[in-house]
Amino acid sequence: MKPGSVAIVGAAETTELGRIPDLSEIGLHADAALNAMKDMGIGPKDIDGIATAGTSPTNLAHYLGITPTWADGTAVGGCSFMLHVRHAAAAINEGLCETVLITHGESGKSRVGKSGFGRSDGSLQGQFEAPFGPMGPPTMFTIPVLRYMKDRGLTHEQLANVSVVQREWAAMHPRATFRDPITIDDVLNSRMIAYPFRILQCCLVTDGGGALIMTSAERAKDFPTKPVYIIGTGESVETPMISQMADFTSSRAFRVSGKKAFDEAGISHSDVDHLMIYDAFAHLPIYGLEDLGFCEPGEAGQFIMERNTAPGGKLPMNTNGGGLSYMHSGMYGMYALQESVRQMRGTSPAQVEGAKISVSHGVGGMFGASGTIIMSNERP
Amino acid sequence: MSDKYQALPAPTPETQHFWDGAKEGELKLQRCTSCSHTYFPPRPFCPECASRDVEVYSASGKATLYSYVINHRAPKGWDAPYSIAVVELEEGPRMMTNVIGIAQTPEALELDMALEVSFEQVSDDIFLPKFKPSAGGAS
């Protein structure tokens, strides 16, 4: 896409985050959508394009009273919303629709009106992974890490430190779930979940949602909000089976998606003022920093240890506290995008002064998919 | 059997040979007769060159421990802690499994240690490929 041709003009999370037992999943989608529409002063009749994951575009359109001319139900896990932003930019540029609403809502904790993730015993995962006793992502997404640690020299302390630094960012966010400071020792002494991962290295389980509204850069001027321009986008998928990931020390989907986004934006890594890397588990920022090209292979653990991504560092990362401390409903990508938008608007409680370019990088499934969105508050 | 294996594999026409082999104590892989690529999981064409000319053969059953976690939250029927591992087969492909016959500790489970397949019957027709330390020591 042409950098800067499309902008995010509406953005909001659900009214509450954390534990929301009085709203079903579709209700969380709608709450976030209504907040985003209010943010820019429009209503459902003004929306002509919709994209969502976790529910269907049909459910969303019906529930909110939208008559779309474009709908995208891409559902590749937690980064689906990065892909929606990318697809919406293309659709707007192609004239398929003018104003796109992207929603997420998930009752991860309270499980009210929860959409099920079906398991098929005849799928390849069902036959060749599920029988070996996995207990969800904490026991699967984490499997590559011991190989990474041996091949790349990452230490347990460096892995634990990822959670420590992100908690420092969370402390600045009134809406973050966990805000009290933690130490490396706290992390390494917390309850073992799936060696080498302890509970403070695993994401939260919470309720919430978020919504984004996009339109062309030209039309963006008609709305009261500060436009956040999309300047680069990327996406890819690799495998639904963690055991079949080609390289346990690097994600192909990350590399492909990231390169596409950086090439499209025409920026270098030193141009990036703010970074979000989807952190369902503590190793993801390490893989992300390397696969996006911010660090050489094997250097990201030490890069974080040296406080480059911490408050005051040269590359502020996961400034909401991430999935490890802010919130994680299941498909966290929407919250990474929301924090990038806040940073570009200059409204984050952990605002990076003068930030002009933000990279929001997501994962879907367990290294199964990826989406990368590069935003700027200046139109190139 | 027990309620340990609530998630029992349901073979499809493309994977039936694997489970038939497992029942006979053989670890079946597929190989492309055009480009010689060996691959897993099963499919009726080569994922490397897309040729449909592929054959099933019996693997050695030898592998090395590639990576793993030790799960401390047991699902129903399982005794924690236990390993959920990925092994690299001598023939190249990797597969998920449990490492058995050894202490389920980081000290005992050394990456790259030699392993060999050991089938565990979990229903009338399903025998799961698990891996245990190789009898001959290092491969």
Image (cartoon, coloured by chain):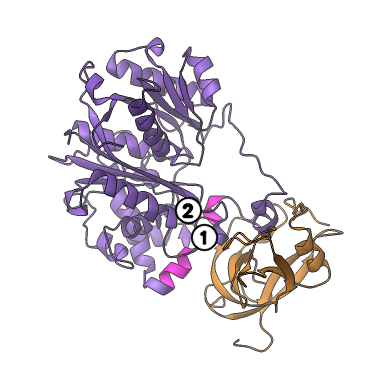
Chain colours: A purple, B orange
Counting labels gives: 2
Choose the circle earlier in sequence order: 1 or 2. Answer: 1
As drawn, A70 above or below A242? above
Residue in the image at 32% along x and 60% along y = A290
Q: Which residue is mark 2?
A: A367
> Which structural element holds mark 2?
loop
In the picture, the quarter occupied by the N terminus of chain A is top left
Q: Which residue is mark 1?
A: A245
Residue A229 appears in the picture as rendered = yes
Quarter of the picture containing the C terminus of chain A is top left
Is residue A314 shown left or right of residue A9? Answer: left
**Whole-percent x and y of residue B26?**
78, 73
Host chain of mark 2: A
Is A31 in the magenta?
A: no
Magenta extent: A136-150
In this rendering, would B42 be left or right of A39? right
Q: Amino acid at mark 1?
A: Met
- Tags 1 and 2 touching, CB below 8 Å: yes
Q: Position of residue B21 (x, y in %)?
A: 80, 68
Q: Is residue A71 above or below residue A260?
A: above
